[in-house]
Amino acid sequence: MRATTIHAPRDIRLSEVDDPTITAPTDAIVKVTAGCICGSDLWPYRGENDIDAGSTIGHECVGVIEEVGSAVTSFKPGDFVIVPFDHCDNTCPHCRVGMQAACDNLGFTASGQAEYSLVTQAEGSLVKTDGMPDASLIPSLLTLSDVMATGWHAAVAAGVRKGGTAVVVGDGAVGLCGVLAASQMGAEKVIAMSRHEPRQAIARQFGATHVIAERDEAGTEAVMEITGGVGADAVLECVGTDQAIKTAFAVARPGSTVGFVGVPHGVELPVRRMFQKNVGLAGGMAPVRQYLPELLDLVTSGAINPGLVFDATMSLDDVAEGYKAMDERRAIKVLLQP
Amino acid sequence: MRATTIHAPRDIRLSEVDDPTITAPTDAIVKVTAGCICGSDLWPYRGENDIDAGSTIGHECVGVIEEVGSAVTSFKPGDFVIVPFDHCDNTCPHCRVGMQAACDNLGFTASGQAEYSLVTQAEGSLVKTDGMPDASLIPSLLTLSDVMATGWHAAVAAGVRKGGTAVVVGDGAVGLCGVLAASQMGAEKVIAMSRHEPRQAIARQFGATHVIAERDEAGTEAVMEITGGVGADAVLECVGTDQAIKTAFAVARPGSTVGFVGVPHGVELPVRRMFQKNVGLAGGMAPVRQYLPELLDLVTSGAINPGLVFDATMSLDDVAEGYKAMDERRAIKVLLQP
């Protein structure tokens, strides 16, 4: 099949690789309808993560079941499914408390930017739609495989509550989905920290009541002004850099929680400030399967339209250009059609 | 008055200093019935915190109101009061959400190991007993000024729940109070990590169902065995060292929270592990006033007896020996009688 592979920093190719095959009874093969490029794919692209030269890349996709293993009974060829980037059995002790990201049988989508993708633990991981979805829904459904579920996780971890104030640090696709999540959860003030015009516009569509273009101290002061000097009731950190974490803790009110979902790179947590201000930290890799049924309802009912984070759609053939566009921040998030 | 002063590492003296006086309408003077030495007093004693040579030390006490400022209307001379180590107005935005440790008018007890102590924000900070308490209750009431409230805060921050498993790292007085708190909150298994016979005995009296003497990897393995390989639902970190924090995160199950109340010294938070395992961190300086009414009820009704953490009672004259005994771990916690 045709699949995206990474060979070195900034060396992304569309290659011919072996089709995935069922090797365990819990496996399923999905024919990818749409995949996409994640902000976290840019870490190896930029050489900030190790690269296994020639390996496939891409962990977000939706598609149609092609084949299932013998232990998969709830799905059959032809079903349209959302594939969480983190696969889980949904029965182990961690799954049972809603922490599917730590499943005893954890697996990951390894070829989301390709024609086919293997799902381990298909029975526990997949969620199917009621029939074939309308093409207009595909982008929003695709966000449920990672980015929207991750933004949602940030809001859950931060403890967003009805009537409170939520600050979202980061205006990437995850941050924008965090804005949407905080708004859905009833935050009265949703403050998006963003200096990019097109992203600000999406943030407002997603429910941001305030947009702050300033960063660091000026950004913190702006949040303090909006919150009457108190700080935010909940803070969503959706970047993963030290600067973003520092901003998140600076704007969090005492007793609140920073929900973090950006994979930390070079982060040193301000432990003394956290202690002195009683500001907690929670979050991590999103347990996508936990949120999928609820988010699927919100998308199919039209309550949310997270697919707006895709501002570019490309053929899989152009995947290298897709990475380039996201790296240079010319695109927020690129949808790929195999 | 006679008051404890610190002059250099391991140089604790009982000195003659000026009596505290009312300088603001919100002040009150308390004649100390009992004070005590805190584990955190050992940081400067051991030279690990800066010392302002000649300054008074001690932040825990109970006693009788001697004099109040003009704005203090709920207390009068003769009332027996518990003095939270952190003073608060109990009306500011932080106090109103229960985070009195971040009060806009925050103050601290500065001469708890003395004859008299000044309370700023007396109206918001103090809680009085119903008449003069029986002498037998004094030790338990004294713990409410800090150590029991701090152990309680660790349990609240860690999210201890009925039926769950709680691990307490640290067998100092705060850790023991954390055991008592977790037990009161209904944890089914309360695992105390302690290698000291007398502390283990108090932990058991306080409700520990398991005691683990091993540390580090062996200690972690022991917790994993008790929890069926899953890890603890809640972890109370009551020390503040890097080793204790590392142990706390190692035994916490994915999705759980480490509640920390030991002032961090040389701690580097394991941010990648926190992210990968979705283990949060919450806590900090305890908002004592928040918990005081509830804890006072538990003490006066006899439901809890946290005063058992005092295994030595000394005259204030012997305060230097008290520090020595705690530093050498000959005493868990020393009560001082002025």
Image (cartoon, coloured by chain):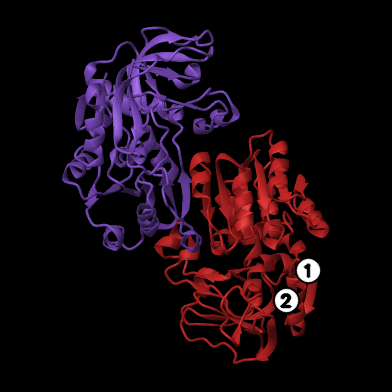
Chain colours: A red, B purple
Question: Residue B96 is drawn in which quadrant?
Answer: top right
User: Type of residue at label 1?
Assistant: Ala
Tell me the subunit letter for badge 1: A
Mark 1 lies on residue? A331
Q: Tell me the tag on residue B181.
A: none
Indicate the position of residue A192 as horizontal and vertical percent values: 72, 50
Quadrant assignment, res A170 = bottom right
Camera-side residue of A91 and B105: B105
Q: CA distance from mark 1 to mark 2?
A: 9 Å
Evaluate whether residue B305 shows in this view. no
**Discs 1 and 2 carry the same chain letter:** yes
Is label 1 in a helix, a strand or a loop? Answer: loop
Q: Which residue is mark 2?
A: A323
Instruction: Tell me where residue A53 appears, x and y as whole percent.
Output: 59, 86
Q: Amino acid at mark 2?
A: Tyr
- Residue drawn at point x = 49 percent, y = 20 percent: B120
* Quarter occupied by the C terminus of chain B: top left
